Amino acid sequence: MDIRDAKAVITGGASGLGAATARAFCEAGADVTILDRDAGGAAFAEGIGAEFAQCDVTDEDSVTDALDFATDRMGGLNVAVTCAGIATAEKTLGRNGPHRQSSFDRTIGINLSGTFNVARLAAARMSEGGVLVFTASVAAFDGQKGQAAYAASKAGVTGLPLPMARDLSRQGVRVMAIAPGIFRTPMLEGLGQEVMDGLAKDVVYPARLGDPAEFAALARFIVECDYLNGTTIRLDGALRMP
């Protein structure tokens, strides 16, 4: 698919990896609608020439309304990139007792169930084929201390592309996931330069944090490369989390 023919929705598109992807797609000539819980994303969307719909990825009615809006405004839908997600840090057994079940359920609900919710509803609107691109994480393979919920949610995401690609082959819908390593996003920048430098030292090459524009470039390549389907691509500078 030529990126100029893309009619794309991007969840979590108001910040971080999602925002970089939305900007890159718009600059390349795609029609883009940003879906995000933060109503402030409307200003960002307007600034890059995209549409905006406020959306909670865990709520079926919210996603349905947002996708209906996007499909109507763009005259169709053939790409969905899911970047909405949260990160949690909580040990299985910590000083205050066992990991809270509520925080585990919330992380799974947004990162995994939210991804599937958007994907299934978007696929139903891809009458002439399309592409689904999910955001996983290297934590799916190299989860560290305090990442049980996050790693489990992202491992679940890596399990979606192959069976979904098989399910959707008759509709001509491809399904892929990207597992980014440590990227320079606003959330990470809030930790300070010293912390970011410490994280970057474990990256093999290039020894730096990932640039969100590199995630966006891979998402675009997946959209445009018709033979990519049913798998997860690590984007991490050969990082293996210690």
Image (tube, rainbow, N blue to C red):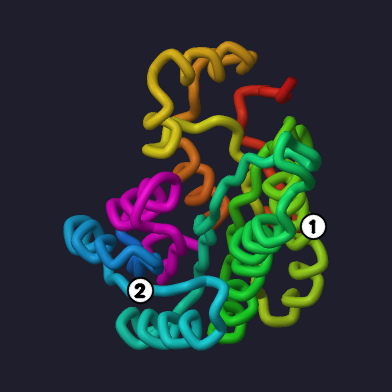
In the rendered structure, the answer to whether residue 84 lies left or right of residue 44 reads right
Residue lying furthest front in this view? 96
Which of 225/182 is in front? 182
Q: Can you tell which mark lies on residue 143?
A: none
Quadrant housing residue 47: bottom left
Q: Amino acid at mark 2?
A: Gln
Residue at x 67%, y 23% (from the top left corner): 239
Camera-nearest label, 1 or 2: 2
Q: Is residue 241 visible?
A: yes
Which of 76/70 is in front? 70
Q: Secondary structure at mark 1?
A: loop
**Image x and y of residue 129, in percent:** 59, 77
Which of 17/145 is in front? 145
**Image x and y of residue 121, in percent:** 58, 82
Which span of residues is magenta-colored? Answer: 1-28
* Alpha carbon distance from label 1 to label 2: 28 Å
Residue at x 55%, y 30% (from the top left corner): 182
The question of residue 26 being in magenta is answered with yes
The residue carrying pointer 1 sits among few (fewer than 14), some (14 to 19) or many (20 or more) residues within 10 Å by Cα, namely: some
Query: Cβ–Cβ below 8 Å for labels 1 and 2?
Result: no
The question of residue 89 being in magenta is answered with no
**Image x and y of residue 145, in percent:** 74, 31
Tag 1 residue:
159
Residue at x 57%, y 73% (from the top left corner): 58
Tag 2 residue:
54
N-terminal of the pair, mark 1 or mark 2, is: 2
The residue carrying pointer 2 sits among few (fewer than 14), some (14 to 19) or many (20 or more) residues within 10 Å by Cα, namely: some
Q: Amino acid at mark 1?
A: Gly
Quadrant housing residue 29: bottom left
Residue at x 76%, y 50% (from the top left corner): 152
